[in-house]
């Protein structure tokens, strides 16, 4: 799992983002302390991140009784700034952050990778209550077994 | 992107190109759903449990076009798979299959990806710089993609539906 983590290519390779991620994780630890954060993570609902809000992240969050950024936005327009505010707030609150990973089927179809999801991952690097709930093997394969198709589309469609 | 939101542009451009599905009686009136980070437009095919779903992830400006098993796909909390079967098929993948029987589809599919890819690069550059992309770039991307989707549904709608019917045994 560790090497998969390391090989994951986030697409905003700025030193600033890395520093910001580290600072946010430190901030979360400092403000809460380990004990307080552990307490908070038990009391507040966990949040889910990943690619594809409609088809993956939202339904998965509802299924496990968690929240997403949509719950926090409560109808406000999404923006890059608010996304960062949300992640930082979740870390300050000591929430469990459940990552269901990339939408490999969509990546295979569109060839597009979510930059925003990559940013979220960077901000969360080192955060103690981050939970990875997906597997990854090769470039376009993997996923969360509860959410994703186990094989890429072309293999499934080959059967027909 | 402050004055005009991504979701508003998405709805305008895709309904402008695809409303022929409803006005020409091929599909029922579109069903629009959404939250802060996503929006989708669903055109259910008349008298069939099949729909065309165009879904936007507004965070990334990524639009996916699916052919869905309608009654399963509209249930809340449903992913790509429901009760052990795939209920969302990507239009692009169906077109790839059709391309083996209809040679013109292959070339058009390549052109679709190239045209939208060109516009998406502009968006991508902005996101890499942690900036929201220019409204015009977003509109051009969505318009180009919507025009292609409309083209495919006009030209190959019957074949696409037949493929889906065979797939789901309808």
Image: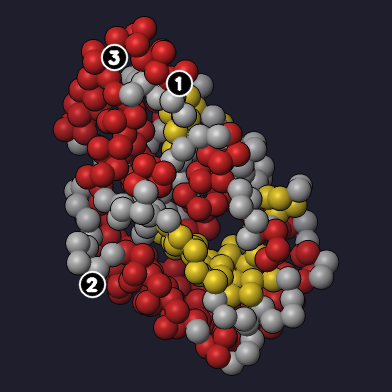
Q: Which residue, given by chain and number where applicable, does mark 2 sit on?
A: B136
Tell me the residue at 58%/34% (across/down).
Answer: A64
Q: Which residue, given by chain and number where applicable, does mark 1 sit on?
A: A43
Q: Reply above or below: A158 against A60.
A: below
Q: Could you tell me which quadrant the N terminus of chain B lies in? A: bottom left
> Same chain for the residues at labels 2 and 1, yes or no?
no
**Residue at mark 3: chain:** A
Decide: marks 3, 1 in contact (CB < 8 A)?
no
Can residue B70 be seen here? The reply is yes
Tell me the residue at 68%/66% (across/down).
Answer: B70
Q: Residues within 10 Å of mark 2 (few under 14, many from 20)?
A: few
Measure the alpha-carbon separation of dots 2 and 3. Answer: 44 Å
Tag 2, which secondary structure?
helix
> Of the residues tagged 2 and 1, which is closer to the observer?
1
> Of the residues tagged 2 and 3, which is closer to the observer?
3
Residue A80 placement, left or right of B103:
left
Measure the alpha-carbon separation of dots 2 and 1. Answer: 44 Å
Q: Reply above or below: A49 against B97.
A: above
Task: Please tell me which residue lies in front, A46 or B141.
Answer: A46
Q: Quadrant of residue B122?
A: bottom left
Tell me the residue at 63%/90% (across/down).
Answer: B25
* Residue A32: assigned label: 3
Q: Reply above or below: A4 against A69.
A: above
Q: Position of residue A135 (x, y in %)?
A: 56, 31
Can residue B163 be seen here? The reply is no
């Amino acid at each position: 799992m560790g090497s998969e983590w390391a090989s994951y290519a986030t697409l905003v390779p700025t030193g600033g983002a890395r520093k910001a991620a580290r600072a946010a994780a430190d901030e979360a630890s400092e403000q809460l302390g380990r004990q307080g954060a552990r307490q908070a993570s038990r009391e507040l609902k966990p949040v889910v991140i990943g690619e594809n809000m409609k088809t993956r992240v939202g339904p998965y969050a509802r299924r496990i009784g968690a929240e997403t950024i949509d719950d926090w936005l409560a109808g406000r327009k999404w923006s890059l700034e608010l996304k960062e505010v949300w992640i930082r707030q979740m870390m300050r609150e000591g929430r469990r952050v459940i990552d269901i990973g990339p939408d490999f089927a969509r990546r295979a179809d569109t060839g597009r990778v979510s930059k925003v999801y990559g940013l979220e991952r960077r901000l969360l690097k080192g955060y103690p209550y981050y939970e990875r709930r997906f597997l990854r093997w090769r470039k376009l394969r993997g996923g969360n077994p509860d959410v994703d198709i186990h094989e890429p589309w072309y293999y499934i469609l080959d059967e027909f | 992107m402050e004055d005009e939101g991504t979701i508003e542009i998405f709805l305008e451009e895709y309904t402008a190109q695809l409303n022929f599905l409803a006005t020409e009686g091929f599909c029922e009136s579109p069903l629009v759903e959404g939250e802060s980070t996503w929006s989708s437009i669903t055109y259910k095919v008349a008298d069939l449990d099949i729909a065309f779903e165009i879904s936007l992830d507004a965070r990334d400006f990524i639009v996916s076009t699916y052919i869905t098993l309608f009654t399963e796909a509209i249930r809340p909390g449903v992913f790509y798979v429901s009760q052990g079967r795939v209920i969302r098929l990507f239009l692009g993948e169906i077109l790839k299959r059709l391309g083996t029987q209809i040679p013109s589809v292959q070339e058009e599919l390549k052109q679709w990806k190239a045209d939208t890819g060109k516009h998406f690069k502009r968006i991508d550059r902005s996101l890499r710089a942690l900036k929201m992309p220019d409204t015009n770039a977003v509109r051009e991307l969505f318009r180009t993609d919507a025009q292609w989707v409309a083209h495919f549904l006009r030209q190959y709608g019957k074949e696409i539906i037949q493929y889906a019917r065979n797939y789901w045994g309808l």
